[in-house]
Amino acid sequence: MDFVDRVLSLQGNSPIRKFSLKCETGVSPAHVNRWLCEVLQRGVLELDLTVDLGYGYYMPQDLFVSETLVNLKLKSAFGIHWWTGAEGTSLPMLKTLCVYSPRFFCDDKLEEFLPSFPVLEDLQMSNIQWIDSDETVSSSTLTTLHITCIRSENPKSISFDTPNLLSFVYSDYVAEDYPLVNMKNLSFARIALRVDDYQIKRVRAQNNDLLEHDVVLHFGNVVKLMNGIQNVQELHLCPDILEVLSLCCDSMPVFHNVKKLLIYSDKGRGWQAVPVLLRNCPHLEILIFEGIVHHVTDKCGDACDCIYRKEKGRSLRSCPVKVVEIKDFGVTMKEKHMIEHFLDYFSCLKEMKIYVEEDGITQIMNNPEVSKLVLDEMEEYNDLYSCNFKLYLDKKSIRNL
């Protein structure tokens, strides 16, 4: 602490462009706040703070009213307290705000909070706890919005009025409604809407089995969110949202601009919406699966070979994808059958890349029989199919091992 005091004092009142600080319990909070106030008074433009001083630590008020601060990054294992609220905050030059913490404490709704940053372009916040069940994110300056929300129940209504947004990462429980989603210029989106296991059972039930006031009855409104992001070029979808989208397959928008689609799979979640997603991406070039093991339902359609159907392969045949990547491959027979299904029915496929998961790598490296079998199958795929087939262990092609 004495060393930092000396460094700052030796510089006098000279301007400071960037100040980074990482400290843990044991450092005096009074010292930390004195350092922050000094660099703020000297016109600091960028602050990168990782401050873990316990649950009772509060940052100085000067931090919330800086007229020079452009970039602010805050990290803490104990939670970030934005204790001044919207009325006590004025950061007219701030363009980037990144908050990474188990909890973000602020007494105001986000729609009241954002006007405190009139030129904000990049907002990244983990573990926001919404103040209200109805929330609106409204900003004409935002180009990047990455938010993870924590709550104990499904929100009533979430809106996004962000016409200049380019990158959107959103994790939250599924809302009952999305009245406004304005993202006409969106380039990248990662949607991780969550539901619990009981709600998954309700989603898979017939409509006449749903209770009158069941929140799941409103989950079909998630199509409004999809309509709002339909101009996106790269789309990532997590396992729960695939189940929820099964409620609105008939009204799913066409994603004319999507060239890269990433689907996260989970053995407890189904693929009911995957066939319509593939059909509704008419210019898809790259398809990535983070795992291909999923819950088998009677609505998997023709995207996989889990259940035999007369229209087997229909959505794959019409898909123009050129490159397929499969990650977390577990070297199981079920997965191999899925891969063969893709090779058989993706008519425009030029390249397939398979990345083996850690347990599968162990099998291949430690068992010569398994290694030979995998190598023989890879050679067979390259002989039978016109696409270039590659299997990777730790990002290295198995042919080079």
Image: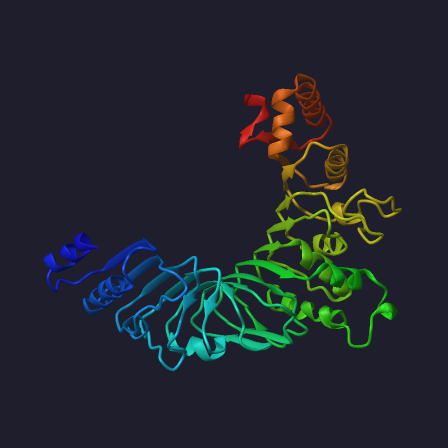
269 is higher (above) or lower (below) than 125:
above
Quarter holding the C terminus is top right
Counting the numbered discs, the total is 0
183 is higher (above) or lower (below) than 134:
above
User: In the rendered image, which quarter is residue 34 located in?
Assistant: bottom left
114 is higher (above) or lower (below) than 51:
below
- At 41% from the left and 62% from the top, the residue drawn is 98
Q: Position of residue 290 (x, y in %)?
A: 63, 45
Q: Position of residue 310 (x, y in %)?
A: 89, 46
Q: Nearer the viewer, residue 56 or 100?
A: 56
Q: Position of residue 231 (x, y in %)?
A: 58, 63
Q: Is residue 171 left or right of residue 372?
A: left
Q: Position of residue 227 (x, y in %)?
A: 64, 68
- At 76% from the left and 40% from the top, the residue drawn is 345
Q: Nearer the viewer, residue 103 or 365?
A: 103
Q: Nearer the viewer, residue 382 or 272?
A: 272
User: In the rendered image, which quarter is residue 124 located in?
Assistant: bottom left
Is residue 303 visible in the rendered structure shown here? yes
User: In the rendered image, which quarter is residue 67 located in?
Assistant: bottom left
Q: How is the image coloured?
A: rainbow
Q: Nearer the viewer, residue 383 or 341?
A: 341
- At 20% from the left and 61% from the top, the residue drawn is 16
Please identify the residue farthest to the bottom as the structure is shown. 87
Quarter holding the N terminus is bottom left
257 is higher (above) or lower (below) than 289:
below
Is residue 389 visible in the rendered structure shown here? no
